[in-house]
Amino acid sequence: DAKTTQPPSMDCAEGRAANLPCNHSTISGNEYVYWYRQIHSQGPQYIIHGLKNNETNEMASLIITEDRKSSTLILPHATLRDTAVYYCIVMVREWNQGGKLIFGQGTELSVKP
Amino acid sequence: GEEVAQTPKHLVRGEGQKAKLYCAPIKGHSYVFWYQQVLKNEFKFLISFQNENVFDETGMPKERFSAKCLPNSPCSLEIQATKLEDSAVYFCASSQRVEVHEQYFGPGTRLTVT
């Protein structure tokens, strides 16, 4: 699985957009970008994923560069409850992978009033 | 149920004692995953099951750790002769399919070995 690089921490003002970057320069053509987050020692929670097109759901948007070497998770209107560690994970979806998640260090996002 | 349930919430064991953790997956989910989080951001995959069969055990320490998922019972993770380094939060996740984005995590069991 491709290695990812994320900034260790970021701050964001409440109500503003939070843009969390992830570098994955060695990503393979069949690898997806997944984002999970962990709020204060709770179990991780899935946010969004994509292959090459930009994606949006009720939680966030995912922007993947054309060369797929980096991506950005966007929380459009961050709230205090979005304070969490955000993990960018790059992996294949082949069934024999086993679906196990390989977490990196993540980005600790602090949303401030 | 609609949530993954893990018991106990906290477990304290003296070094050398046995620890047993339980996980009840979401009803209808065939896959169960165990992860260990030692430090704040360091997750390690341990083992996964498809129903009662081991699906992937590549992360499982060969000694002292064992796990089971038996029909009509919660899944369990057992650590024989615990060591200080086993202190961690152990998360269980379940999934209906082997899809990365469909894993639902439980609240975790915090194991403290003293």
Image: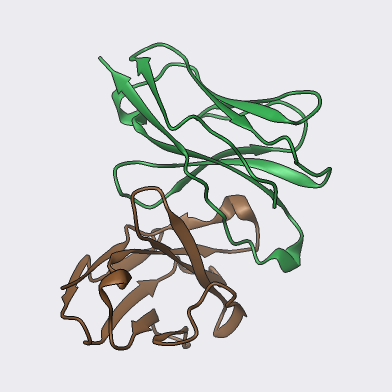
**Residue A73 sits in quarter:** top right
Relative to B22, is B91 above or below? above
Residue drawn at the location 38% of the way across and 81% of the way down: B76
Q: Residue furthest right?
A: A29
Residue B39 on image: x %, y %: 34, 54
Residue A5 in view in this figure:
yes
Residue drawn at the location 81% of the way across and 27% of the way down: A67
Relative to B63, is B107 above or below? above
Which of the pair B40/A15 is nearer the observer?
Answer: B40
Residue drawn at the location 49% of the way across and 29% of the way down: A7
Count of numbered tags: 0
Q: Is residue B58 left or right of residue B33?
A: right
Q: Which chain is brown?
A: B
Q: Is residue A106 left or right of residue A57?
A: left
Q: Is residue B71 left or right of residue A32?
A: left
Which of the pair A47/B83 is nearer the observer?
Answer: B83
Q: Which chain is green?
A: A
Relative to A52, is A42 above or below? below
Relative to B30, is A83 above or below? above
Residue A71 on image: x %, y %: 65, 28
Which of the pair A68/A53 is nearer the observer?
Answer: A68
Residue B88 on image: x %, y %: 31, 64
Residue A69 on image: x %, y %: 74, 31
Q: Residue furthest front?
A: B84
